[in-house]
């Protein structure tokens, strides 16, 4: 799936609305994570040097997706990780288990194009329509 089909951006004042699609719930979670880091930096410059296990819980699907994105953003903000591959091992309505891959930021190779300060819960949602999963996320900039 090329970048145009994984997600679409709409810019509002201090927010980016991101619409993500996936062929499965796992694909949707991986594409959402990809969109976050692709918006922030040139994702092709990220090398896979570290593989981190990640397990995230939520009260329902929408809460789980927002918590997943917040956890990924925390890995960047708190530990300096830029990620580019997301292997979803298991996803249910209230839990996702994955391995995320990338490296710590290297200022000589990585430029942050867009800082994301938070992933907002308002207006964030996911749904299954026919055979496709869709989600909308709000990135606060």
Image: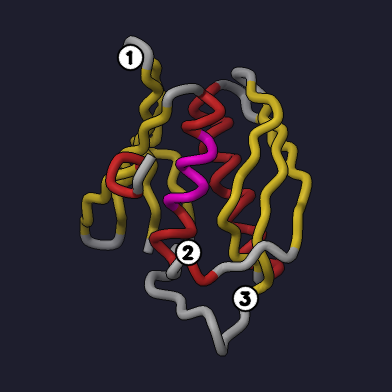
Residue 71 percent location from the top left of the image = 63, 49
State if disc 2 and disc 3 touch (CB < 8 Å): no
Q: Nearer the viewer, residue 87 or 119?
A: 87
Q: Quadrant of the N terminus?
A: top left
Residue 76 percent location from the top left of the image = 61, 64
Q: Quadrant of the C terminus?
A: bottom left
Of the two numbered discs 3 and 2 on the same chain, state the one appearing first in sequence: 2
User: Which residue is found at the position 72% from the left and 44% from the top?
Assistant: 99
User: Could you classify mark 1 by the number of other residues whose Cα lies within 10 Å: few (under 14), some (14-19), or many (20 or more)?
Assistant: few
Q: CA distance from mark 3 to mark 1?
A: 37 Å
- The residue that label 3 is drawn on is 105
Per the picture, the main secondary structure of the magenta-coloured stretch is helix
> Taking 77 as reference, is 9 left or right?
left
Residue 5 vertical placement versus 108 (above, below): above
> Taking 122 as reference, is 90 left or right?
right
User: Which residue is found at the position 62% from the left and 24% from the top?
Assistant: 59
Q: Nearer the viewer, residue 114 or 59?
A: 114
Check if residue 33 falls in the magenta segment. yes
Dot 3 lies on which element?
loop
Say the numbered circle drawn on residue 59: none
Q: CA distance from mark 3 to mark 2?
A: 11 Å
Comparing marks 3 and 2, which lies closer to the viewer?
2
User: Which residue is found at the position 52% from the left and 79% from the top?
Assistant: 110
Say the numbered circle drawn on residue 43: 2
- The residue that label 1 is drawn on is 129
User: Could you classify mark 2 by the number of other residues whose Cα lies within 10 Å: few (under 14), some (14-19), or many (20 or more)?
Assistant: many
> Taking 80 as reference, is 8 left or right?
left
Q: Which residues are magenta?
A: 29-35
Residue 90 vertical placement versus 110 (above, below): above
Q: Nearer the viewer, residue 70 or 19?
A: 19
């Amino acid at each position: 799936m090329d970048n145009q089909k994984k997600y679409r951006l709409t810019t509002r004042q201090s927010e980016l609305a991101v619409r993500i699609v996936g062929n499965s719930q796992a694909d949707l979670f991986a594409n959402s994570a990809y969109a976050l880091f692709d918006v922030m930096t040139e994702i092709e410059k990220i090398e896979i040097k570290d593989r981190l296990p990640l397990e995230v819980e939520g009260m329902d699907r929408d809460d789980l997706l927002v918590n997943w994105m917040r956890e990924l953003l925390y890995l960047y903000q708190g530990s300096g990780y830029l990620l580019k591959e997301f292997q979803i091992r298991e996803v249910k309505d209230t839990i996702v288990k994955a391995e995320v891959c990338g490296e710590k930021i290297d200022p000589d190779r990585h430029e942050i194009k867009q800082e994301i300060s938070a992933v907002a819960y308002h207006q964030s949602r996911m749904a299954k329509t026919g055979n496709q999963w869709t989600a909308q996320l709000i990135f606060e900039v």
